Amino acid sequence: MIKETATVIAVDGDVITVEAAIKTTCSSCQAQSDCGSGVISRALSPKTQQLTLQSPVPCKVGDKVSIGVPEAGIVTASLWLYVFPLIIFIASALSFNALLPAVGLSGEFWVLLGSLCVTFLAFTVISGYLKKRDQTRFRPVILSSIPANGAVQQHQP
């Protein structure tokens, strides 16, 4: 389980909205003041992210909560959204490279264009499939609450 700490910013019954700071590796790099990527990252990326979740423990605005995301869900989603389209891109490029000269279209442009179209279509289908699929594996859960008085309330999902 990947864990992160967030602050409760709104409470509506057992549904809470939390805000967590987005951390980047640029802040720990020694070259951060001289690096163009770090400057762009700091300028364009959002500093916080808000999530709305069911809370199994009582919370109030200002409390800190520990949020967990199942690692299996992240690995599975990464495979579906990054690895499979890459494999499809390579397979379609090899296929177009072998088949297009037979219909009179030779050149890398046509192979690249066909491969990009097939990959975009595959990514769209995979993304739609994942959205319709059971989302509980990808959903963050509240693990514990740390009220302002400091007493930790644990929850085991």
Image (cartoon, rainbow, N blue to C red):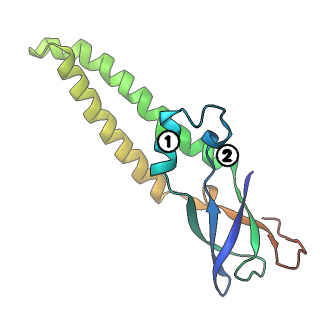
Instruction: For marks 2 and 1, give the one nearer the viewer.
Output: 1
- Say if 41 sits above or below 18 in the image: above
Q: Nearer the viewer, residue 64 or 27?
A: 27
Residue carrying label 2: 72
- Say if 6 sits above or below 33 in the image: below
The residue under the point 17% across, 17% down is 100
Q: Position of residue 24 (x, y in %)?
A: 61, 45
The disc at residue 125 is none
Residue at the bottom extreme? 13
Under circle 2, the secondary element is helix
- Say if 64 sits above or below 15 in the image: above
Toward which corner of the image does residue 21 lie, by quadrant? Answer: bottom right
Q: Nearer the viewer, residue 32 or 10?
A: 32
Marks 2/1: CA distance? 32 Å
Residue at the left extreme? 104
Residue at the front extreme? 33
Q: Nearer the viewer, residue 148 or 89?
A: 148
Q: Position of residue 147 (x, y in %)?
A: 82, 77
Toward which corner of the image does residue 91 lie, by quadrant? Answer: top left
The residue under the point 64% across, 43% down is 27
The residue under the point 60% across, 55% down is 138
Under circle 1, the secondary element is helix
Q: Amino acid at mark 2?
A: Ala
Left/right of residue 99 with respect to residue 41 in the rendered view: left
Q: Position of residue 40 (x, y in %)?
A: 46, 43
Left/right of residue 85 with respect to residue 73 in the rendered view: left
Q: Amino acid at mark 1?
A: Val
Residue carrying label 1: 39
Which quadrant does the C terminus fall into?
bottom right
Left/right of residue 20 with respect to residue 111 in the rendered view: right
Give neighbour class at mark 1: few <14, some 14-19, many 20+ (Cα, 10 Å).
few
Give neighbour class at mark 2: few <14, some 14-19, many 20+ (Cα, 10 Å).
few
